[in-house]
Image: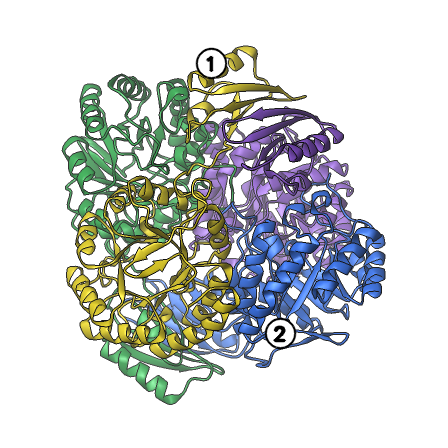
Chain colours: A green, B yellow, C blue, D purple
Amino acid sequence: MVVVMKLNTNAEQIATLDKRLKAGGYQTHLIRGTKRIVIGAVGDRRPVDPAGLESMPGVEKVLRIMRPYKLVSREVQEADTVVKIGGMGIGGNKLTVIAGPCAVESKEQLLLAARAVRRSGANVLRGGAYKPRTSPYSFQGLEEEGLRLLAEVGAQTGLATVTEVIDEESLTAAARYVDILQIGARNMQNFRLLRLAGKSGKPILLKRGLSATVEEWLMAAEYIVSSGNGDVILCERGIRTFEDSTRNTLDLSAVALAKQLTHLPVIVDPSHATGKRELVGAMSRAAVAAGADGLIIEVHPDPTIALCDGPQSLDPGEFDDLMTGLRPLATAVGREL
Amino acid sequence: MVVVMKLNTNAEQIATLDKRLKAGGYQTHLIRGTKRIVIGAVGDRRPVDPAGLESMPGVEKVLRIMRPYKLVSREVQEADTVVKIGGMGIGGNKLTVIAGPCAVESKEQLLLAARAVRRSGANVLRGGAYKPRTSPYSFQGLEEEGLRLLAEVGAQTGLATVTEVIDEESLTAAARYVDILQIGARNMQNFRLLRLAGKSGKPILLKRGLSATVEEWLMAAEYIVSSGNGDVILCERGIRTFEDSTRNTLDLSAVALAKQLTHLPVIVDPSHATGKRELVGAMSRAAVAAGADGLIIEVHPDPTIALCDGPQSLDPGEFDDLMTGLRPLATAVGREL
Amino acid sequence: MVVVMKLNTNAEQIATLDKRLKAGGYQTHLIRGTKRIVIGAVGDRRPVDPAGLESMPGVEKVLRIMRPYKLVSREVQEADTVVKIGGMGIGGNKLTVIAGPCAVESKEQLLLAARAVRRSGANVLRGGAYKPRTSPYSFQGLEEEGLRLLAEVGAQTGLATVTEVIDEESLTAAARYVDILQIGARNMQNFRLLRLAGKSGKPILLKRGLSATVEEWLMAAEYIVSSGNGDVILCERGIRTFEDSTRNTLDLSAVALAKQLTHLPVIVDPSHATGKRELVGAMSRAAVAAGADGLIIEVHPDPTIALCDGPQSLDPGEFDDLMTGLRPLATAVGREL
Amino acid sequence: MVVVMKLNTNAEQIATLDKRLKAGGYQTHLIRGTKRIVIGAVGDRRPVDPAGLESMPGVEKVLRIMRPYKLVSREVQEADTVVKIGGMGIGGNKLTVIAGPCAVESKEQLLLAARAVRRSGANVLRGGAYKPRTSPYSFQGLEEEGLRLLAEVGAQTGLATVTEVIDEESLTAAARYVDILQIGARNMQNFRLLRLAGKSGKPILLKRGLSATVEEWLMAAEYIVSSGNGDVILCERGIRTFEDSTRNTLDLSAVALAKQLTHLPVIVDPSHATGKRELVGAMSRAAVAAGADGLIIEVHPDPTIALCDGPQSLDPGEFDDLMTGLRPLATAVGREL
């Protein structure tokens, strides 16, 4: 930690600060510049919240040197985490493709979607049972009935399953039916939910918040891992920016960066990121080329009658074309599909 | 709703769309432009999710005409909502000032803060008992003990009380101890929590999310009101932008705009918005001048030892100066303090 | 400057870096933490570009301690700069109000606008002669004829004048006709234009770029001042964010912050910031309350036929109401109008 | 164009508006909804500025149906534009790789860079002679001497050349020495410069502004094309968002989208977008997979002594690795390198 003092600081302020830092277990190093005084504070107490220090008289700002996350960092574990689900691993050389409808609407709809994505090579079936919707008047999901259908269709088609959970009740229910629990973008900093996820005994798919920095995203994962669950899969799904010609802005640099900072697998959701079916293919290819460990893609048997997110859903034929195009690309970057 | 067709649309696509709109209860009006065909769809089914329509063949985009919120809109209720707490009203001519520490740390700390803010003219005591923190290693709040202290100190000083709730458990507990329940920025789209707040029987202080549009903020309020609770106080607390010299960017235009769109009271949190004590005064004045119905300000007996948010907390003397400066300003804009 | 070394740095890398820093005129201080090594580099060479250092082997990042601007900083000049135009001063206790149409359209239009704003108490007449327009097919301004009209109407009404310049040609022409040259948001980092403005001998109104940080804005002013022209007036006019219910997001915290960081006057443009006539009043009041030294407001004799920016222009009656409302507010914050 | 009327509009306001629209050459269609009245206005006058309409009494908002750009649109020209430079084409099946240093520093430096990038397969040499720098105290480029060196080294190595122009003077000079003129992000809406570029007789590389929407970017290209120069190459180089762990946020969805909206070639600058050497490879691969027509990459013989942008520059070995990795990827997406 480096404490930068104000121009007009005085000896007493420095002494007070020095005493406080030492009381906090730090060794201090005073550096007198031509204009400013700077104090380097050395210690392994990680992570320290420097907020109080910035309020002390004479202090201009506090610069943090250490990263605030620990367990999810490559500095602590260099090798990639591979999350195991049945015989499948997420985060290894083989790419994972999760596909299925935005919301579970009926057995028929889900089964049609599942068979189609399975045929084209997907590994995991997605489907929303508890839908967080911007409007209280929109379709909110089939809830437990949706979970039951997911489990049934997953078993029937041999696909693993993932669904979003939004609170303790849905998490507890979903943990009984599906293989992977998803925490959505709007709940990325629902810290209670993160801790519950940490104790759920299930792999967690953690989406990045719409306005979360990479560091906050990793800190959210740190919540889950530090609660006892190392099986976290990160998912970039677009951030909110000024650009309104796409639903969000897919941040693939964040994917490449996250792969360097953490050992956890990172996948990409091009459907929510772009909100436009006609961009899903290009962004899926870009994600794999950027180093993503997998994709999560919305596929509906008939997007024109989807109860949610129709404009970004592929139909089975479009999804099959996408998978066909991805194979040579995966090979070109040394991955398998 | 206006449906814009693609350049190369054909008669069959238009007929299909027309049929679907009519089945949905709309009357349709076909407008043939020199290049494009546009369909106006008229009906009072509000709010309709146009997502499915955008996926239909031949459709380029769907433009919504109606606002998606209803109960919170001035179109439905023209007169200001005044939220009553004891003898006090939030949203009327008299400005409400909520003040107190970021977190309840101890009885002594809370009592010192409460007495100070009361003396300077605050109406409501704030204090966090359940703290949503970015890091799992930071102080997370005293929880129920914090609530107990809030109730005790509130009673002792004659101040109403507000605290943040983060899930069903904390909401249920807080409803037993405090007067106003706060839903924080990170939970603004925690829709389950919004519904529970709608049934809590307590006034709700709803903070705007870090990257929420004004429309999404009002839709979140619509969740609460449509669940049966009309006592919602909106709070602007800064949005996330590229600017990093302040913690967030205080969006006062959103306050002025919200006051036009909704009848609910709107207050401002200059402490979280700026993250800097030395900007809190100027932004408090600006908020009142912009038409805010009140302020929520962090005050700590000694910010240098605050367990959270020290850099943005005022000490009692600074808060008193702020209140003194606000009085003539309130008068100048026709409000009372 | 503080150089943070990578975890796995070695003695040779540190020696190389140390040598380079010393060759650059710095004294170095090595601080060995429990995990990382940090080098404090002290020297008054300001501003140093640390880009090269970050590329050196073993270096993780370089933290700058000093602010990159100098001449515009309160550290160099504590007292407020007051820009003198005729008998008037911008930046002193008296607020400056600049008003007039987006574009000069005709003598009649400009004269009507000038007389109206003068009557209501404005000090300076604005009017665009060279319009930077997003579309090549939109009205681009009357150019030199517009300047001539500005000068004529300014003389006739006794108002000082300001107009936007967009390149060397328009700057040279405008300097012959008007009192203040404006550099628009889109040219805030047109560094050639900034240098020319520095040599123009005229006061410069420098708008903040749509996505410029406060620091970049001050650096742009530094360009002008370091080219020999200390008469710079900063203008906040809204930044670009995700929020689309207003044209831009007016950043009043930036105004309060800029007033602390620099001695230059800072004014606010609520018309471009909000893009909505019905928000201009509230944001004008908020700006004055936040500490702005003045306002620049679009006023058109008849906004419904304005050639540009009609929706954000006030008509003379609305402007008069605004001025009337501002007076008590100015008094309340210790300013004169 | 669709005009949405306010709730409380009256017959006179509608008649006035209707008259004005007809006077503007539109046919009008009145649609009476259950709550609101909407007027559809049909005509081929493109692009119309609806600003005046929004100021008319009774009007709530105006929704544009047509895109504001024309010449650059795929609606006007379906086939890809291929910009010819010597025997080379930019925008065809073969990818273009532009590489070289941020700034031309010396003949030796440029020649080392040119030989290296040529050897690894680059087609065009980049090098800045006129540098737009945030600080007036930073290195500003060798100016005409830099252009001379570019021409000399280009001729010697058989590489085409590109350099940034920042005003009329540098544009005129550069047009004498180099093959492609670049307009930088900060000048994307320097409309005078765009018009001059339109008359320069040279292909133009047009970078997207830091906070420009895709539509504004295409409108900037429309300026150049409508001034008589169809040889425009678009370049995505990252946008400004809240995320600060990368220098900017590379917006690859915008690349895929732009390829659908316009016939102009689109390339990507992963160096400026990320600001981090270690992310350039991944983002180059992602860009090609997303459908970009080429890349522009900063390469310096020794980034540790680069006068600008060292941290994002590759050294020759890193660049060679990048090119080697790109070849199979290009093949996988049906392109040549």
Q: Nearer the viewer, residue A165 or B116?
A: B116
For disc 2, the marked residue is C336
Asked if residue A16 is positioned above or below residue B159 in the image, the reply reads: below
Q: Is D47 left or right of B268, judged from the image as shown?
A: right
Residue located at (40% from left, 46% from top): B217
Query: Mark number for residue A150?
Result: none
Residue located at (49% from left, 49% from top): B260
Q: Is A257 left or right of C127, judged from the image as shown?
A: left
Whole-percent x and y of residue A24?
24, 75
10 Å neighbourhood of mark 1: few (<14), some, or many (≥20)? few
Badge 1 marks a residue whose secondary structure is helix
Asked if residue D275 is positioned above or below residue A29 in the image, the reply reads: above
Whole-percent x and y of residue C12?
38, 68
Residue at the far bottom in the pictured view: A11
Residue at the far front in the pictured view: B87
Q: Nearer the viewer, residue B306 or D82?
A: B306
10 Å neighbourhood of mark 2: few (<14), some, or many (≥20)? some
Whole-percent x and y of residue A51?
33, 69
Mark-to-mark CA distance, 2 and 1: 65 Å
Residue B90 picture quarter: bottom left
Residue B129 picture quarter: bottom left
Residue type, numbered disc 1: Lys
For disc 1, the marked residue is B19
Q: Nearer the viewer, residue C113 or A80?
A: C113
Same-chain status of marks 2 and 1: no
Whole-percent x and y of residue C235?
62, 63
Residue C114 picture quarter: bottom right
Q: Quadrant of the N terminus of chain D?
A: top right
Q: Chain of mark 2?
A: C
Badge 2 marks a residue whose secondary structure is loop
Residue type, numbered disc 2: Glu
